[in-house]
Amino acid sequence: MCGIVGITSNKQVTTSIINSLRKLEYRGYDSAGVATINEGHLNEVKCEGRVDVLEKNLSKSNLKGTIGIGHVRWATHGIPNSVNAHPHSSESVSVVHNGIIENSTLLKKLLIKKGHKFKSQTDTEVIVHLITEYLKKNDLKKSILKVLKKLHGSFALGIIFKDQPDLIVGARRGSPLAVGYGPNENYLGSDSYALKSMTNKISYLNDGEFCILKKDNVEFFDKKGKKVNKKVLEVSLDGQNYDKGDYKHFMAKEVEEQPTTIKNCVNEYIDKVNSDINIFNFPWKGNEISSIMLIGCGTAYHSCLMAKYWFEQLTTLNVNVDIASEFRYRNNRFKKDTLYIFVSQSGETADTFAALDLCNKNKMKTCSVVNVVESSIARESKFVLPIHCGPEIGVASTKAFLGQMLVLYILCLKISKMRKDIDKKKYLEKIKSLFSLSKLTKQTLETDNKVQSVCSSFAEIKGSMFLGRGYSYPIALEGALKLKELAYVHAEGYPAGEMKHGPLALIEEGMPVVVLAPRDEYYKKTISNMQEVIARGAKVLLITNKSKDEVYSENIWEKIEVENTSEDLLPFLITIPLQKLAYYSALKRGYDIDKPRNLAKSVTVE
């Protein structure tokens, strides 16, 4: 999951490439590079580290050119260093690549036999040498077609040529690629977000297509080299400069934005006057759906698990959840009356997109819940539900997680009403409760000081557990994931009732354990499981909701209370202290919170 950008223009492009790479840094930040063509020479500057380092190196080298490509890397083949950083170049060709070339080892052996010498450990460099080899006997278009046929795997490519200094070639298979249009210049980018600061006119390459960009013309071709026409879409311009403001990190800002994003999402989907859900264009009738399959990865998968509980509680549908990377490799029994729901913050998650593509090929009902409406998953789904969160820059998802859960809950209510699984009184009660969720979320953010007081214990441990039952179990998984992502602490989420079936053996004296026990139907059972943990010496951090009733234990280490709401909506509130716990634990350890090691925001490789 790397970010690529290309610009061909009648003016210097280096500064614009750097600005675009900053926007793409959520895709990778272990190395970066730029290549340009100037006065007949192909030049490149690369570095280990981030775009700030690259910019300093560029200022020293005075890299010029009216055409160029740039890259931010998330390493797949080869360690992060300046040699393995993109672009990769020969004397005549320079390439940036997002994806994985699965047959790179075989291709490399064949090219070495032909006299090619490799400098890096990457799979990408074989593309450079393949193009260089084919250009000896073929024109540019034919060479590109031959190269694309040779490559197995996924890729988005940006390619420039010393002997053709007026054009950029872009190609896509699996990984997303967008083209932007401007006055006397055109652009190539991994997504529209990187291009919005320069243009609001965008086209997207479909799988297997490639394009040739010149500053005043763009041509698109299918995998056979036949010219294809493309729609030019007008997307909203990047009007807001999304910066940290007074916050130390984007994540801190995004956690605090959650009351606003929840309010925006509720206002978007709920008609307050009529107390109804305004998803009026839902393309299927209630009797056309008898089961639900929810599919996602990571945090999105946890939102799917949460939705399973809601769908089972509020509808009579059969509901299953699957991890996208597993879904496509099983012998699935596709059913026409199943609604397949795909959840992805970026809308570009490769495994989720591949699962969606498989469902589309089998002519299934597909719906996506995404944050980016111009994304590949959104474009390929039969129905799209945006979460209306705005940009999320921090790699560890926070406001998008609550947004995904909220949209899935609203969709659950919608389908329940369509199928007459819920009576009108209960439906109206649940609609009404949604309007108070933003305020309750804001009040729950005030647990900040309490969370800070316990974070030291989590910053200094070798491991922890997060326990919950029912609605709280998916939130336990998400809380553990956040601590792993940000503080690099081994943490596991478990159903509280499963502790005695093995994980209890891990409990040792002083080990901090988070127990999620809101006062719902599972409360007494969860407290009983908590006692088992305390009896083995664990320090229990209990997260529950406010109540006059005392907790059934005197041996709790610390307690954090969230606001009260319906059982359905308590998962939103108990999530917030877990987000803050991960944040402050990472802050205590001095880690890069917005860009945790080895991770990237948009996972565009399998």
Image (spheres, helix red, strand yellow):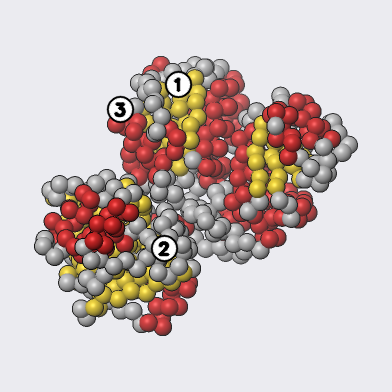
- Residue closer to the observer: 426 or 490: 490
- The three-letter code of the residue at mark 3 reads Lys
Residue 396 relative to residue 163: left or right = right
Residue 538 is situated, as x and y percent measured from the top left of the image, at: 80, 41
Q: Residues at badges 3 and 1 in contact (C-beta under 8 Å)?
A: no
**Quadrant location of the C terminus in the rendered image:** top left
Query: On residue 72, which mark appears?
Result: 2
Identify the residue position indicated by label 3 in the image.
Answer: 363
Q: Which residue is mark 1?
A: 291
Residue 166 higher or lower than 481, as above or below:
below
Q: Secondary structure at mark 3?
A: loop
Amino acid type assigned to the residue bearing label 2 in the image: Val
Q: Residue at x 52, y 37 (%)?
A: 301
Residue located farthest toward the right when viewing the structure as drawn = 554
Q: Quadrant of residue 168?
A: bottom left
First in residue order: circle 2 vs circle 3? 2
Please tell me whether mark 1 sits on a helix, a strand or a loop: strand
**Is 216 or 334 nearer to us in this picture?**
334
Q: Residue at x 45, y 42 (%)?
A: 344
Give the residue at x 56% y 17%: 423
Q: Position of residue 503 (x, y in %)?
A: 70, 35
Q: Residues within 10 Å of mark 3 (few under 14, many from 20)?
A: few
Query: Of tags 1 and 2, which is closer to the observer?
Result: 2
Q: Looking at the picture, which amino acid does disc 1 mark? A: Ser
Count of labels shown? 3
